[in-house]
């Protein structure tokens, strides 16, 4: 079943699971997790988002256009300004916003707009205007999460470099946040369109 804007109805479950996982990880981490409103290190640098993330952002923008049109218009202006600056060097299709999937495209994306603030970031308050609908990359940044570490696909825990100062490996492991990758992939498989894009394009859908 597909919900508004083509977003799978099960995305609400994914968001709820992630919200609960973050709250639990934050409770276990205590003062080691220094993520706070206004800390914007993770809001700089461009990253790829999947189609599920993009559909969620589009649904959020649809909500804002109805409930807070001034804020929606401000986000759109920032997204247009961002793309005006970086669109010409976008490593993909600037018409659809799809990232290219060739090796050359991936290499170009490594250095693409690495220092730029996200267009959803309020430059005055340091808050995210689409926090409720943010991509999965944003939802897992901060607490320790399991990730591929080596070519042999062994895994390691990664976390924000500002967090867990002086914590031991065991203490960090005790705060691991589980991520429901299988559920996310199942939802992605329901979408008729695949591929990756970036936040600026998703905000303008």
Image (cartoon, rainbow, N blue to C red):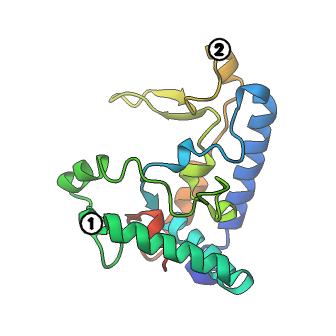
Crowding at mark 2 (Cα within 10 Å: few <14, some 14-19, many 20+): few
Q: Residue at x 59, y 42 (%)?
A: 141
Q: Residue at x 70, y 63 (%)?
A: 132
Q: Residue at x 59, y 29 (%)?
A: 162
Numbered-mark total? 2
**Circle 2: element type:** loop
**Circle 1: element type:** strand
Query: Disc 1 vs disc 2: which is toward the camera?
Result: 2
CA separation, marks 1 and 2?
Answer: 41 Å
Is 126 in front, or is 89? Answer: 126
Farthest bottom residue in view = 66
Q: Is tag 1's residue or tag 2's residue first in the polypeptide sequence?
A: 1
Percent x, y of residue 3: 65, 80
Q: Is residue 53 above or below residue 179?
A: below
Q: Is residue 156 above or below residue 120?
A: above
Farthest front residue in view = 124
Percent x, y of residue 85: 34, 66
Q: Residue at x 55, y 34 (%)?
A: 146
Dividing the picture into quadrants, the one containing residue 22 is top right
Percent x, y of residue 180: 62, 48
83 relative to 205 in the view: left or right: left
Q: Is residue 11 above or below residue 5?
A: above
Crowding at mark 1 (Cα within 10 Å: few <14, some 14-19, many 20+): many
Is 180 in front, or is 84? Answer: 84
Q: Which mark is residue 54?
A: none
Dividing the picture into quadrants, the one containing residue 27 is top right
172 relative to 43 in the view: left or right: right
Q: Which residue is mark 2?
A: 166
Q: Which residue is mark 1?
A: 92
């Amino acid at each position: 079943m597909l919900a508004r804007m083509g977003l799978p109805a099960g995305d609400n479950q994914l968001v709820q699971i992630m919200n609960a996982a973050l709250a639990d990880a934050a409770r276990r981490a205590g003062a080691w997790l220094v993520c706070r409103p206004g800390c914007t290190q993770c809001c700089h640098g461009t990253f790829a988002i999947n189609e599920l993330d993009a559909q969620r952002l589009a649904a959020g923008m649809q909500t804002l256009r109805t409930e807070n049109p001034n804020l929606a218009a401000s986000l759109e202006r920032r997204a247009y300004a961002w793309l005006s600056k970086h669109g010409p060097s976008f490593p993909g299709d600037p018409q659809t916003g799809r990232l290219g999937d060739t090796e050359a495209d991936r290499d170009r994306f490594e250095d693409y707009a690495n220092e730029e603030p996200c267009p959803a970031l309020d430059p005055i308050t340091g808050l995210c205007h689409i926090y409720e609908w943010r991509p999965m990359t944003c939802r897992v940044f901060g607490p320790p999460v399991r990730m591929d570490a080596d070519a042999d696909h062994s895994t390691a825990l990664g976390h924000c470099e500002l967090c867990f100062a002086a914590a031991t490996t065991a203490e960090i492991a005790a705060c691991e946040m589980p991520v429901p990758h299988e559920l996310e992939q199942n939802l992605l498989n329901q979408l008729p369109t695949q591929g990756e894009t970036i936040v600026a394009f998703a905000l303008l859908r």
